[in-house]
Image (tube, helix red, strand yellow):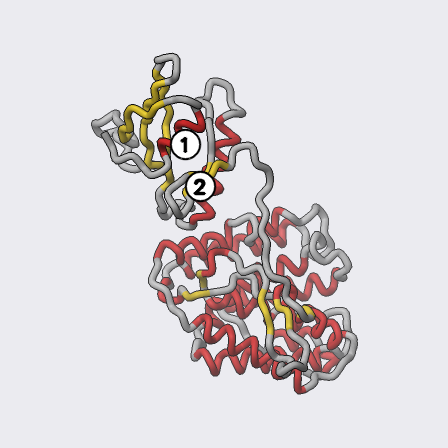
Amino acid sequence: MAEIPEGLRELAATLFPGAALEAVEPLAADAAGGEAEKAIGYGEPLRVTVRLPDGARRRFVFRTQRADAFGHDRRADRLEGALLSHELFNALPAHVRALDVGVAKADGRFLSLSGTGEPYLVTDFAEGALYAEDLRRLARGGAALPLDLARADALADYLAALHGEKLDDPIAWRRAVRDLVGHGEGIFGMVDGYPPAVPAAPPERLRAIEERCLAWRWRLRERPARLARTHGDFHPFNIVFRPPGAGEDGSGFALLDASRGGKGDPADDVVALAVNYPFFALDHPGAWRALGLLWRRFWGRYLGASGDAAVLESAPPYLAWRALVLASPRFYPRLTAASRDALLGLAERALDAGRLDLDAPAALFPEDGA
């Protein structure tokens, strides 16, 4: 008889009131044997036998999921899989019924999620203003102030320090590169989110970008030494700067919505922020004078602090991903076709060149003399 997990007796009594737990036995992933035997499975199932109050026996399967390299490496993945199984099993005819779904608590007991609805998350509230407001002010013709330079420096310094935590996790690296291309929030998902016949972004152009990025996946996946701690969604709408005063100089900030497991290529974060400097300047003649200054300031500070010149060689597919987001009419419906073309063109040239040229955005703004 297998060791009975803490809380399993209580769970059995909850599922079958008055029942007594009699036996717990491990179930092999595949008992077929021979050449066709399956070596691994996604679960670690136990067969549990209980005696009901009327004397009858009832058997059910209790299973947890193991972490592996097939999209289950994060606890959130395993929670997602359990919830999906609970919904799907009971929707299919002739399928075994799902009796419950839940999570193990720290004290060894089990918390049922059966019958619940959408998940929720509660966080602190960050006082201040989104960094996007600074970029909007500059796009409207504002001059870059010392505070703007200090904030670009603070963001670069933060990322250099964060990315200084290198990680040895080949599974997480492959996952990060795979998600860049194939995740619903990644390149494939962004392309699928475009309506048909978008000006400057017809399907054939999007397909060509996608195919370039697929080739880049094979280039990136062999660079696991680049894996570092990351934010995962480091853009101006996820950065809240605290106002000057009360001991603050205005360069202090709080971050929102860290994503994608917090592990990846540093290029993910630096490109997610930096692409917004040219993006906010598009459709605003003269704005690149100030925003271009911040582009150069941010990149110079980051490269100097991190010493990671190779980030420019990883940047192109991340630039393509972020350009696809910013150029999408689902996210930015007021963007002009000319600006959409400029963004996608910037990404296409980087993909073809094999690295990000830091002088490339200036070509989008010849009227600014930059």
Estimate the x, y position of residue 110 in percent, counting from the top left.
Answer: 42, 39
Residue 153 quadrant:
bottom right
Of the numbered discs 1 and 2, the one sitting upstream in the chain is 1
* Category of crowding for the residue at label 2, using alpha-carbon neighbours closer than 10 angstroms: few (below 14), some (14–19), many (at least 20): some
Dot 2: what SS? strand
Q: Nearer the viewer, residue 126 or 233?
A: 126
- Can residue 86 be spotted in the picture? yes
Q: Is residue 333 above or below residue 79?
A: below
Residue 239 quadrant:
bottom right
Estimate the x, y position of residue 355 in percent, counting from the top left.
Answer: 50, 70
At x 47% / y 75%, what residue is drawn?
A: 160
At x 62% / y 64%, what residue is drawn?
A: 238
Q: Is residue 310 above or below residue 368?
A: above
Residue furthest out toward the left: 34
At x 45% / y 52%, what residue is drawn?
A: 178
Q: Nearer the viewer, residue 162 or 173?
A: 162
The disc label shown at residue 11, or none: 1
Real-space Cα distance between discs 1 and 2?
A: 11 Å
Inspect the image, locate mark 1, and give the three-letter code of the amino acid beneath it.
Answer: Leu
125 relative to 259 in the view: left or right = right
Task: Pick the quarter of the image with the C terminus.
Answer: bottom right
Residue 361 quadrant:
bottom right
Dot 1: what SS? helix
Q: Nearer the viewer, residue 114 or 196?
A: 114
Estimate the x, y position of residue 235 in percent, counting from the top left.
Answer: 61, 66
- Can residue 317 be spotted in the picture? no
The disc label shown at residue 103, or none: 2
Inspect the image, locate mark 2, and give the three-letter code of the amino acid beneath it.
Answer: Val
336 relative to 343 in the view: left or right = right
Estimate the x, y position of residue 159 in percent, counting from the top left.
Answer: 50, 73
Q: Is residue 366 above or below residue 117?
A: below
